[in-house]
Each structure stands twice: as structure tokens, then as C-alpha cells.
């Protein structure tokens, strides 16, 4: 019979069958679990306090009619004061399609031209040149992100202002390309996309550059030995091997563009004219935190924000389905041999 004998103080204790865990092994496993939970606890607390609880409060707030006019008198947390009136008002808004169209145009165009397209192109270029020169070039692209938003937008306002102050007009005016007007007012979407895109491109640039540098050089050399051109190496070697960073950058930058509005607020404030560059997030801000409508409508603005959260979740799910997220997170087959 298989028995496990343990000695203590020179004596023989009663044997325990092999395979049956003793008390000390149970305590060890319990300690390891508690240690793991202890390490995760700070992050869990922060996520609950600053994500889940605010989302719940935001959703409850969106069901109420809380605004500055009834603040202190409306008990918005009671179910008796909840309704779907705010959501009905959103879909009945005559500018609903304009806000949605502006948001989609802004997100897709900025993402394609800068936050993803330019970031990937510069990452590929700077990893195929001298390493030190590529590092300096990538560092220059970080400057817009490091510059405070107010200073950055004031710089662009100065660059695009009317003659004789605007730098762009000073160069293009004598050529007859511009008539000397304020270019932000004349071409608002161009500046909104460029100003935000120059900031967003730096994030993807860093991620893509790191991912490309991590690809084993043997794969790239093998492609060259087999006669593959640079474009073929990029298409068949580099891009398939950075699918995970591509998914991450696309998802993160899409969510970032959906929720960012401070540059648009400082540059055009949703204008010129009637909501010409007003995106969804900026509309929620104007309703909830400004006096655009005579009083701040916290409940109505929260409803706009809740719909934006739903749009963001839907976009993330689509990205994960397209890039086959389940396959990307699978364990390597070599570990199973």
C-alpha cells in the first residue's frame, strides 16, 4: 500500500495516503491565492471606483431630468423620477443626423489618415533607416502630444489667422492661393483633422515601431534571401506579425477619437456656423457642462454620453471580430507539445 510518512521531532506520525492533500498544502495554496488577490486588489478598487461606479451613476443620471434649474429639488436617484424621455429627445433632435455624421466623418478620416495610416507608414519608414536617425524622427512626432492643449491650439490659431498675422497666409497669399481670411473659419474640417491627427499619430507610431523592432531579424533576412521586395516583406511578413498591435491601436484610437473633444472645443467650438464641426462628445459637453441652452442639462447630456459608450463598445466588438481576437489570444501551439 502506497503510504506517505512524515516525521516530526524524530517520531513517526500516522501515515496519510498519497494523493490526499495535507493541511500544509491547503494553507500554501490559500496563501498563494490571497497573494494574487492582494496584488490585484489596488487595480480592482481603482477600476470599480473610477469606472464602474461612474458608469452606473451616469446611466441613472441619464434617466432623470436633472439640470441646474431643478438642482437640489429633484431626487434624481429615485426610480420614480426615471424615464426614457432624454433618449426620445435625442432621436427626435433635428440635428441628430448631423452630429452622428460629423462624428463618423471625424473619427474615420482622422483614424485613416493620421492615427493609423500615418503612424504605420512612419513606423515602417523609421525602422528601415538608420536606427539613431529613426529614433530622432519619431521623437519629433511626439512633440504635439507633449505640448499642452491650450498652447498647441493657440499656436495653430496663430498659424492659420488672417493676414498679416497668419503664417500660412503670408506664404500662400502672394501666390493667390488664399484671399487672406481666417483659414480655420474657411476650412474648419481640414484643421480639425490635421490638428488632432498630428497628436494621435504619435501613439500608434510608438506602438508600431516597438512591434516591428521585436520581429526576429531572421524572418526579414529569409524574405530577402527568397527574393522578396520590401513591399512584399511588409505585406507578407511584417503586417501579419503585428496584427495584435494593429488591433490595439485601431480600438484604442477609435475610442479616443469618439470621446475626445477638447481640441475641437478650443479650435472651433463646434462651429463655424450651426454645428458645422460639432461631434457627439462635444455635444454632450455643451449640454451638460455649458450654458448653451440657458442652463446646464446634466441628465440630457448624460444620455448623449451613454449612447456614445454604446457606440464605442460596438466598434470594439467589430474590431475584435474582424481581427479574430480569439485566435490572437490563444496560447502558442509549441507550448502544448
Image (tube, grey):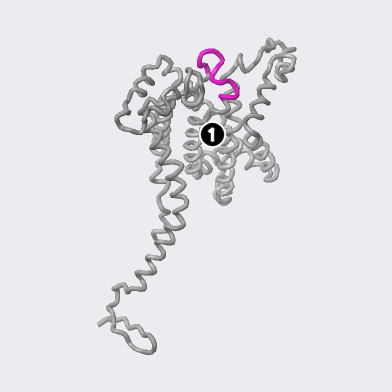
In this rendering, would 205 be left or right of 258? right
Which residue is nearer to you in this view: 245 or 179? Answer: 179
Where does the magenta region start and end?
264-276
Circle 1 is placed at which residue position? 116
Classed neighbour count for the residue bearing mark 1: other residues with Cα under 10 Å, few (<14), some (14–19), many (≥20) = many
Furthest residue in direction bottom, as rendered: 10
Q: Residue 204: say if magenta.
A: no
Residue 60 seen in the figure:
yes
Q: Quadrant of residue 183?
A: top right
x, y (%) of residue 40? 45, 54
**Quadrant the N terminus occupies:** bottom left
Residue pictured at 56% horizontal, 51% vertical: 216
Secondary structure category for the residue under label 1 = loop
Which residue is nearer to you in this view: 6 or 296? Answer: 296
Residue 104 seen in the figure:
no
Mostly what secondary structure, the magenta segment?
Answer: loop
Residue pictured at 51% horizontal, 23% vertical: 290
Residue pictured at 34% horizontal, 22% vertical: 85
Amino acid at each position: 500500500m502506497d503510504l506517505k510518512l512524515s516525521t516530526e521531532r524524530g517520531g513517526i506520525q500516522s501515515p496519510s495516503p498519497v494523493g490526499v492533500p495535507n493541511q500544509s498544502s491547503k494553507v500554501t495554496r490559500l496563501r498563494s491565492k490571497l497573494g494574487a488577490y492582494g496584488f490585484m486588489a489596488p487595480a480592482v478598487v481603482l477600476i470599480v471606483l473610477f469606472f464602474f461606479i461612474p458608469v452606473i451613476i451616469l446611466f441613472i443620471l441619464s434617466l432623470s431630468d436633472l439640470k441646474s434649474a431643478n438642482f437640489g429639488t429633484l431626487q434624481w436617484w429615485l426610480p420614480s423620477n426615471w424615464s426614457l424621455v432624454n433618449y426620445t429627445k435625442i432621436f427626435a433632435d433635428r440635428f441628430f443626423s448631423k452630429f452622428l455624421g460629423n462624428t463618423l466623418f471625424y473619427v474615420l478620416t482622422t483614424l485613416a489618415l493620421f492615427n493609423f495610416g500615418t503612424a504605420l507608414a512612419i513606423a515602417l519608414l523609421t525602422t528601415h533607416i538608420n536606427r539613431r536617425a529613426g529614433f530622432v524622427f519619431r521623437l519629433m512626432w511626439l512633440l504635439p502630444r507633449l505640448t499642452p492643449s491650450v498652447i498647441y491650439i493657440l499656436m495653430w490659431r496663430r498659424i492659420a489667422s488672417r493676414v498679416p498675422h497668419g503664417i500660412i497666409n503670408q506664404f500662400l497669399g502672394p501666390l493667390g492661393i488664399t484671399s487672406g481670411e481666417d483659414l480655420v473659419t474657411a476650412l474648419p474640417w481640414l484643421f480639425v483633422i490635421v490638428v488632432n491627427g498630428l497628436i494621435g499619430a504619435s501613439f500608434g507610431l510608438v506602438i508600431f515601431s516597438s512591434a516591428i523592432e521585436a520581429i526576429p531579424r531572421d524572418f526579414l533576412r529569409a524574405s530577402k534571401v527568397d527574393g522578396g521586395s520590401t513591399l512584399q516583406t511588409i505585406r507578407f511578413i511584417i503586417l501579419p506579425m503585428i496584427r495584435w498591435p494593429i488591433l490595439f491601436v485601431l480600438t484604442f484610437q477609435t475610442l479616443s477619437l469618439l470621446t475626445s473633444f477638447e481640441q475641437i472645443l478650443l479650435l472651433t467650438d463646434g462651429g463655424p456656423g450651426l454645428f458645422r464641426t460639432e461631434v457627439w462628445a462635444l455635444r454632450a459637453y455643451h449640454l451638460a457642462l455649458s450654458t448653451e441652452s440657458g442652463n446646464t442639462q446634466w441628465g440630457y447630456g448624460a444620455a448623449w454620453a451613454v449612447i456614445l459608450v454604446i457606440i464605442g463598445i460596438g466598434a470594439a466588438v467589430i474590431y475584435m471580430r474582424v481581427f479574430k481576437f480569439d485566435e490572437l489570444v490563444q496560447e502558442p501551439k509549441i507550448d502544448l507539445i
